[in-house]
Image: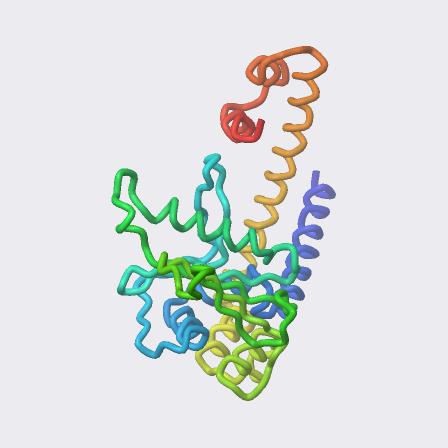
Amino acid sequence: MSERKSEQELDFERKHEEDLQRIREFRLIDDDFMAAVFEDHDCAEFLLRIILKRDDLVVREVYGQYSIKNLQGRSVRLDILAVDRNNRAYNIEVQRSDRGASEKRARYNSSLLDANLTDSGEEYDALNETYVIFITENDILRAGLPIYHIDRTVQETGMIFNDQAHIIYVNSQIKDETALGKLMHDFFCTDSSKMYYPILANRVWYFKENEKGVATMCRAMEKMRDETAAEQNIKTLLVSVKNLMKNMNLSPEQAMDAMGISEDDRKMLLQRI
């Protein structure tokens, strides 16, 4: 019994040391770390002011790793969701892979904001003005520009179609001496002392060097491991349920009964079958 406990302790220490090493290597371009840093009200406001060039922007509320429902009722996690004092909503995502920042992904996120930020039965005019902002590791749109603003236009006149749904891509490859370029430099720093902006450097230092901040990140990483394991379990169960339905000509409920699947897992599986 004591030997098994010792193995558990060694495994915990190994995972903890791995977490500490990962935290040391984290940058703002890494989505989990970015979400932790920018769920801070002042940091989120600072970020949006630079990207949008609006010193008057005041953030009212901000959430990191915010879960939002899609049309099928499944949860989709946004890196950052912020709302300003004029009820404009901002979804900020960092994407290291080109696929994760495709044009249709931007459209999808925009539709999620519309569907979730409006109460059922409200008039169309009640829709929030929205911004979906992708900060990308690569120049997704390949024009060599630091930032791209996308708004619907009327083709025949070239006039803006004022639906107030905006999409912005920030190209993090350009790290020049502009305010945005310096911000992108900071997004790739692992060392807070090498960052331009103190407001961000202090927050990065907190999660990397402060005992409480490091503990917060370690708990977040443990939670992510648990969620990843739970998601993998659901995927495995889903394959088994579908195979049983096909091979035995069973309904979803009959297949899950035969497998003895728990009520909580049933709810998640039924959303995906």
Residue at 52%, 85% in the rendered image: 196
Quadrant housing residue 247: top right
Q: Can residue 190 be seen in this view?
A: no
Nearer to me, 62 or 116: 116
Specify whether 63 is left or right of 76.
Answer: left
Residue at the front extreme? Answer: 156
Residue found at x 37% / y 67%: 41
Front residue of 220 and 49 = 49
Q: Which colour scheme is used?
A: rainbow
Asked if residue 76 is positioned above or below residue 236 in the image, the reply reads below
Q: Position of residue 184 (x, y in %)?
A: 56, 77
The image quadrant where one finds the C terminus is: top right
* Above or below, comparing residue 155 to residue 260 in the picture: below
Quick one: quadrant of the N terminus? Answer: top right
Count how many numbered circles sit on residues in the image.
Answer: 0
Q: In which quarter of the image is residue 261?
A: top right
The percent position of residue 109, horizontal first and vertical second, equals 48, 52
Locate residue 207, reporting x and y percent: 52, 69
